[in-house]
Amino acid sequence: MRQVLLIVDVQPSFSPPAWLLRDIDRLLGHMPTVATVECHDEAITPFQAQLGWRPPEQERSLIAADRHFVKHGYRPTNEVLHHLIQLAPERVLVCGIQTETCVLAAGFALFDLGLRPTLITDLTLGSSLDPSGALGARLWRHHFRHTTTLTELLATGT
């Protein structure tokens, strides 16, 4: 099965644990990889005005993905989505930070394009509302159905 890995916002400002970086790295080299990085531009997404906080203006991914894209806001940019379409995957595996917000927003964007989003449930973290990511995983299953785990992927030789 042709797969692509989308890594959502695994960046220093979100303080990912070492195990998340290590385990995502285990998938590198097995398929094309794309990482997003959340950066702030108030003119594009008014985080400060609406929520009273903002991500950093400059940031980098902590994962050595094949391609990196900056985004402003919750969902992947059209540039990210176009790149994923060009890779013509049968499914897009999704992992990263903020399972119930940014990761879920990526799922909706991928679903709307017919790219069969599949959440790697043990490679996501939630927000301060739900650090475990369980709420986001439940929402994902409800909306998109498809989930997997790192163990399942490694067992298939992904």
Image (cartoon, rainbow, N blue to C red):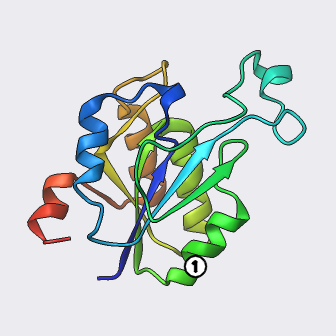
User: In the rendered image, which quarter is residue 148 located in?
Assistant: bottom left
- Residue designated by label 1: 85
In this view, the residue farthest toward the left is 155
In this view, the residue farthest toward the top is 52
Q: Residue at x 43, y 23 (%)?
A: 130
Residue 123 in picture, x, y percent from top left: 31, 44
Q: Residue at x 73, y 32 (%)?
A: 57
Q: Amino acid at mark 1?
A: Ile
**Does residue 136 sit above or below 93 in this rendering?**
above
Q: Residue at x 86, y 21 (%)?
A: 49
Determine whether, in the image, residue 149 is placed left or right of residue 145.
Answer: left
Q: Residues within 10 Å of mark 1 (few under 14, many from 20)?
A: some
Residue 103 in picture, x, y percent from top left: 51, 46
Q: Depth check: 40 or 47 in front? A: 40
Q: Quadrant of the C terminus?
A: bottom left
Q: Depth check: 61 or 126 in front? A: 61
Residue 138 in picture, x, y percent from top left: 39, 41
Determine whether, in the image, residue 150 is placed left or right of residue 98.
Answer: left
Residue 40 in picture, x, y percent from top left: 74, 34
**Does residue 152 sit above or below 123 in this rendering?**
below
Q: Depth check: 133 or 49 in front? A: 49
